[in-house]
Amino acid sequence: MTTETIEFQAEARQLMQLMIHSIYSNKDVFLRELVSNASDALDKLRLASYQTAFDGSGDLEVDVSDLHVTVRTDPEARTLTVADNGIGMSRDDVVGLIGTIARSGSAEVLAQLRKAKEAGGPSEEASAELIGQFGVGFYSSFMVADRVEMVTRRAGQSAGVHWESAGEGTYTIAEAPDAEQGTTITLHLKPVDVEDGLHDYADDAVVRRLITRYSDFITWPIRMGDEVVNSRKALWSRPQSDVSEEEYTEFYRHVSHDWQDPLETIRLSAEGTFEYQALLFLPSHAPMDLFMRDARRGVQLYVKRVFIMDDCEALVPEYLRFVKGVVDAADLSLNVSREILQQDRQIQLIRKRLVKKVLSTVRTMLDTVPEKYATFWSELGRAVKEGLISDHDNRQAILEICSFPTTHDPEKPTTLRDYVARMPEGQDAVYYMTGDSRAALEGSPHMEAFRAKGFEVLLLTDPVDEVWVETVPEFDGRPLASIAKGDVDLGGDEIDEETKQGFEGLLTWLGEALAEDVKEVRLSHRLTTSAACLVGDPGDLTPTLEKMYRAMGQ
Ligand code: ADP
Ligand code: MG
């Protein structure tokens, strides 16, 4: 039998080094990650077995009658083993899933880390945050073990593989003809070092405590010896008052692959003819793939406690793609497909309600815990603003929770509500300007007359701003008006005939001289100190949009 030695992908190696050099102070969490993976593997196997039963192919010959996780300690050998009889991995799976980090955005995050290193090493906090963005479950075992062995066999395949690594750049992989279905991971533990956060993970009592602390909600039995250690209660079906903050947090980490705390927990349920329960979370930071083409989107879908799918797009619109959690619907068929879900009326109703609930939760946050809202908005606002374009039905609710940089206060963005409340007598539009940066907008000649009048102007610098301002006509009965377009009515006096005549010659001359570049040269109140500025027609593209389109080759 041959044993092959293979190098980890560069990103994977970097990440593992980070793990090994223990920048994450709470090392206990490796167990949660391993149990979480085992639980996912059991979910996947059960689902696959349902699907083959439904479509009649029946080619997955596996036993699903006793799916469970086993955890074993061996104090003499100083090992800890986490095993599951779930879906398992093929050789290619192992090389692709364990040997590399396929997640989009990982290269960027690692580049950030490298930069921080060159600048004297990242702080523990910064590193933990970066690691948290990966949700690097499996590698966390190298925080507590100097060697990790894995034996795994993909359900339905006849032979398995044996994988082993000390986390130092390479791993070995060999055939394992007698491997049982599923995955067994054995950690050869580092010496106990309580000071450094390394507890005795070969001690049953320690391990049991960690399981009840971090993995109690896992719905599969987690066995130690003959005993099932976890209570197995689905969090979302327990009365809200029974579930502690910490339990929610651990569950959030399980479903989101995020290592940090959620910003907000949202529960909702419906009874009657169409029954469902949902447990949703808003993250406290933007997921690293938030603006990538293949960003993960959606929450987990369960049917009567049975896991059906991850990232169920049908349940959440794209602009809320950062919302994580679970929806458990009672009346769906177990073999629903993604395509069917998109058309399903019940799913559409749930989605409607989820969206309203998320928006109203943010609204409450804004009204009652402004600092929390500020975090939400600075991390996720750019995504939410996409909803102003795509979600017509909820536009008003979305506008209510937006805030924008403004000339009123350079430090603090403003909501439209606050803007309107500050509007002086004589101002009847909400003024904004779009552009590349705050500095550029503040220095723009368009700003002069508004500054002189004491009219506040929103300074919109996100690319998405260019698009939504074109589709949102007003807020609370006040039109939204760009100060860089058309005739802005500042309520000034008419320009008198005499002045007009005085300028006529100049205007005609300028109009002819610039005929190639401008449509018209106009006399205006718009400026106070500058002599001239460029203005677009109301229907025209803004300079930034023009640049965007040009960059896209249009
Ligand atoms: P994540 O769980 O966030 O995807 P991990 O590093 O924890 O990241 O795991 C990487 C991948 O390895 C998983 O997505 C899964 O495909 C595979 N994997 C890990 N553990 C198991 C297991 N016990 N059984 C089957 N596949 C597993
Ligand atoms: Mg994982």
Image (cartoon, rainbow, N blue to C red):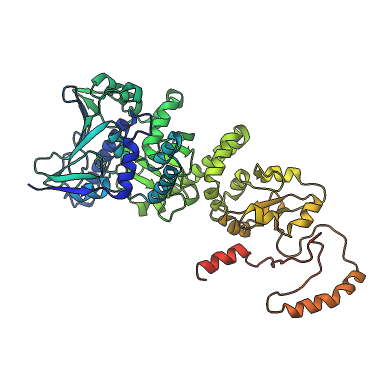
Please report the residue visible at 59 percent of the width from the left and 55 percent of the height from the top: 465
Q: Residue at x 17, y 44 (%)?
A: 172
Q: Nearer the viewer, residue 440 or 215?
A: 440
The image position of residue 23, as x and y in percent, is: 38, 34
**449 up-or-down from 144: above or below:** below
How many numbered marks are there?
Answer: 0
Residue that appears at 68% across and 79% down = 516
Question: Which residue is located at x 22 percent, y 26 percent?
Answer: 223
| Residue 334 quadrant | top left
Q: Residue furthest right?
A: 498
Task: Report x, y in % for residue 314.
Answer: 42, 50
Using residue 87 as the reference point, say whether residue 380 is left or right of it.
Answer: right
From this view, report whether residue 443 is shown above or below residue 535: above
Residue 99 in sight in this render: yes
Give percent across and percent down for residue 494: 87, 64
Q: Is residue 274 visible?
A: no
How far across and down, in percent of the image, does residue 310 sit?
35, 45
Q: Is residue 443 left or right of residue 553?
A: right
Give 364 or 11, whichever is nearer the viewer: 11
